[in-house]
Amino acid sequence: MLHEQARAIFEETGNRGSQAKACGNIGTCYEALGKYDEGVRLLEEARAMLQEVGDRANEAIMLIVLGRCKTALGEYAHAITCHNQRWALVQELHLMNEQASTALELGVVTWAKARVEHRDAARGASLGHSGGAAFLFASPTAGGVGQLDGPAPAAPVFTFAAASGIRRPKAYMDSMHDAAQWLETALRLVETHGSYKTNEGALLHLSFVAFDTVGHIYMHMNMCVYTYIYIYTLSYMYVYLFI
């Protein structure tokens, strides 16, 4: 691989900055190939070298790929940490486009983490291992009012979703709200650049993903008006751009 040859050359010359970039490029290739463990190892090595030479802009690039590897491995908390660290860097460096992409990543990963934790907790509850704690589903009655399956928790940890007759855990709803806020931040940053009215493909893709994801989040939160607004806007973008 050319990147590996370049890395060997830079190691011989002692050029740490170029060695870090070559190492990061190899890690990015592994991420694209689905070899996430190898990608994490090389990206962390590259990041350490970039910190050593003070290259904060390229460190931010390593962090987003590292976060994606962590997400693919199911290590959502670590992924969020990576993206939060990148968020601090791109704000410090005033990199507006990178701020939008980082906010998007944070929104998507936060939502993914919430869904997995909610699914696992609900599975445990269905097996009778929840001990009456949070994360219990309701059983909709004929009148559409949810009744808890199992003993009621000691504290009010549920948010009631009247439209579906389901009591969702407050922690889950809070996480979805956080995810939606990050995605809306991404859209505000994109709107500043007017990206979906131009031919900037990367930011255009970001807009589509953000509108689609936040629409689905609000649908899960039973916020029908917000769901309609975002899904309608997404449909309008498709019509405006492609028809």
Image (cartoon, rainbow, N blue to C red):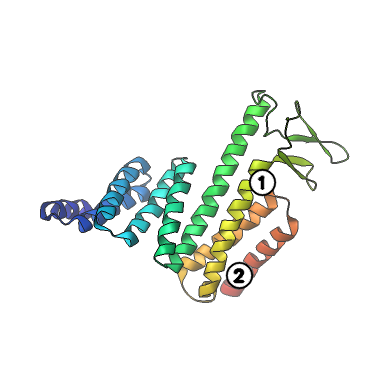
Task: Check the image and report above or below for 131 versus 95.
Answer: above
Residue 74, percent across and down? 47, 40
How many C-alpha atoms fall within 10 Å of the one at disc 2: few (<14), some, or many (≥20)?
Answer: some
- Find disc 1 in the rendering and name its residue: 173
Q: Is residue 183 visible?
A: yes
Q: SS at mark 2?
A: helix
Q: Secondary structure at mark 1?
A: helix
Task: Name the residue at 46% across, 72% down.
Answer: 200
Q: Return the x and y of residue 150 as percentages of the image width and height.
A: 75, 26
- Left or right relative to 133: residue 18: left
Q: Taking 169 as reference, is 14 left or right?
A: left
- Examine the rendered structure and indicate whether residue 194 appears above or below residue 4: below
Name the residue furthest left.
12
> Label 1, label 2: how many angstroms apart (C-alpha)?
28 Å
Residue, x 45% and y 52% (percent of image)?
Answer: 83
Q: Which amino acid, by three-letter code, is at mark 1?
A: Met
